[in-house]
Structure formats: structure tokens, C-alpha cells
Image: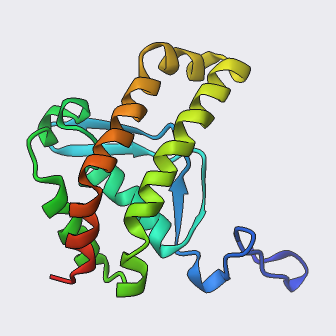
Amino acid sequence: MGQPSGKRRRLRRKGVPHDQAVGHREREGAEVHWDEEVPFVDLDPARPATRVEEMCNVLLWWAPLVPAADREPVVAEVDAVRRAVLLVDAYGLAPDDRAHVVPLARSGAARSWFRMRARAEHLGGGWARVWDEGVGDRILRRQQWLADHGDELHDAPTAQS
């Protein structure tokens, strides 16, 4: 196989240099299914992401940055802040980038509520089903959890442990 006409195709977000687009971040609607401690993550639809965006996505699902009552049972009682520090350290996020993690996580949670509601209203189907099942309330609880733990989250991962 090969690239047509010798041209290389790159997945890029507008304004994100190709050397910073390191992942493919789920916008909203990812599903994490736990079978004991082995997760399955459906990353459809996905898009290119910067290192900070990728880290925010990882933290959302794997810290996880949501209230304990909204977590899967296998991670319900974990120390999400400590796990966030471990993940950010392991990822090697630069100090300047670490300062953007919490604000980006909070703005993502805020946008997610509006996007999910709009998709439920306009597209129906599975979007309407998950909205009716309470995903909007879960997002609001995530927003509150991030507001309540924002300073702790910001101070811990930005302190390069």
C-alpha cells in the first residue's frame, strides 16, 4: 500500500502542530466496561489531541476524576488525586503543561453537559437513552467534584512528585 500521490496524510486539529497531536481523545460518550479489573474502552468517535488533552482524558477514566458514587465498583474507593499524580508523573508531562490539566478538565466537563444534552435532543437514539438514564446528572456531579478537588488536583500534579 502507500500514500496516494506520495502525499502524507496527517490527522490534525486546527491550530495544533502535528508534533503536539499525540493521541486521539474521546470527545464524550466513551464507555468503560469493567470485567473485574480489566477495562474495555470504546474510543469512538475520537480526534487528535495535545499531550494535555490526552492526559485529561486518561485522568477522567483512570484516576477517575468523578465522585466515588459514580465510579465503577472496582475503582470506587481509590484515591483519585494520588492516582492522578502517578499518571501525570508516569506520562512525563512538562511542568508548564501540568498547570493546564485542571482548568482543561473543568472546561471539558462543562462543555460535555451541553454537548450531551444537544445530542440527546437533536439526534435521539443512544444519546437520548443515556441522557434519560442520567448522564447529565453524572456530568454535573463530575463538575462539582472537580470544583471541590480542583486546588488539590492542581497542587499535586504540578508539584512533580
Quarter holding residue 39: top left
Q: Is residue 83 left or right of residue 54?
A: left
Going 20% across and 62% down the picture, which residue do you hit? Answer: 152
Where does the image place residue 88, in percent across and percent down from the top left?
28, 73
- Compared to residue 57, the image places residue 12 above or below, namely below
Count of marks placed on residues: 0
Where does the image place residue 67, in percent across and percent down from the top left?
23, 38
- Front residue of 71/145: it is 145
Display coloring: rainbow
Where does the image place residue 21, in percent across and percent down from the top left?
58, 75
Going 35% across and 51% down the picture, which residue do you hit? Answer: 60
Q: Is residue 91 left or right of residue 52?
A: left
Q: Is residue 117 left or right of residue 90?
A: right
Going 67% across and 28% down the picture, which residue do you hit? Answer: 118
- Front residue of 139/17: it is 139
Where does the image place residue 40, in percent across and percent down from the top left?
34, 43
Going 37% across and 29% down the picture, which residue do you hit? Answer: 138
Q: Is residue 20 left or right of residue 159?
A: right
Quarter holding residue 54: bottom left
| Quadrant holding the N terminus | bottom right
| Quadrant holding the C terminus | bottom left
